[in-house]
Image (cartoon, grey):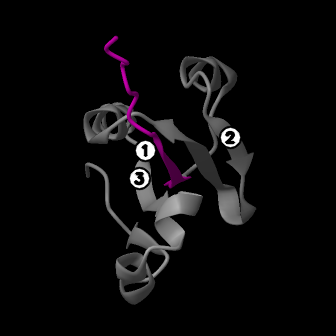
Amino acid sequence: MNEKKTNPTSIYRIKIQGALKSPLADWLGDLQIIPQEGGATLLVGHFADQPALRGLLDQLWNLNFVLLSVERIENQSEQHSPQREQEGTGEAYSELQGPS
C-alpha cells in the first residue's frame, strides 16, 4: 500500500502597516488578525509552501499595504535540530517597503 505523506506547513507572522477592514479580513480566511500598537496589524497563519506565502504577499502588495516584517516561526521538530540552533530560532525580514 502506498501512503501519501503530507508536507508540514510553516507558520508565518506578517506585520503590515495599517488596519484591515472587515471585508478584507474575511478574504484572509484562516489567518489570525491581531491589531498592534501604532496602527499596524499582525497576520499569523499556516502556509503550505513558499508559493502560498508569496501569493498572500503579492495580494497585500496589490492592495497597497506596506510590509513591516515577515517572520517564519519554527516547528518544534526544527527548533531542536543542531543546525537550526547554530542559525538561530527564526528567519525575519523587517521594514520591507510596498509600492510607492
Q: Secondary structure at mark 1?
A: loop
The stretch of residues the image draws in magenta is 1-16
Q: Which residue is mark 3?
A: 66
Q: Is residue 26 left or right of residue 97?
A: right
Q: Which residue is mark 1?
A: 65
Residue 36 drawn above or below residue 63: below
In front: label 3 or label 2:
2
In the rendered structure, which amino acid carries the disc numbered 1?
Answer: Phe
> How far apart in space, not on screen, are marks 3 and 2 (Cα)?
16 Å
In the rendered structure, which amino acid carries the disc numbered 3?
Answer: Val
Measured as percent of width and height from the top left, residue 55 is found at 31, 31
Mark 3 neighbour density, 10 Å: few (under 14) some (14–19) many (20 or more): some
Name the one closer to the observer, 88 or 43: 88
* Residue lying at 38% horizontally and 27% vertically, measured from the top left: 5
Q: Which residue is mark 2?
A: 33
Q: Is residue 76 left or right of residue 22?
A: left
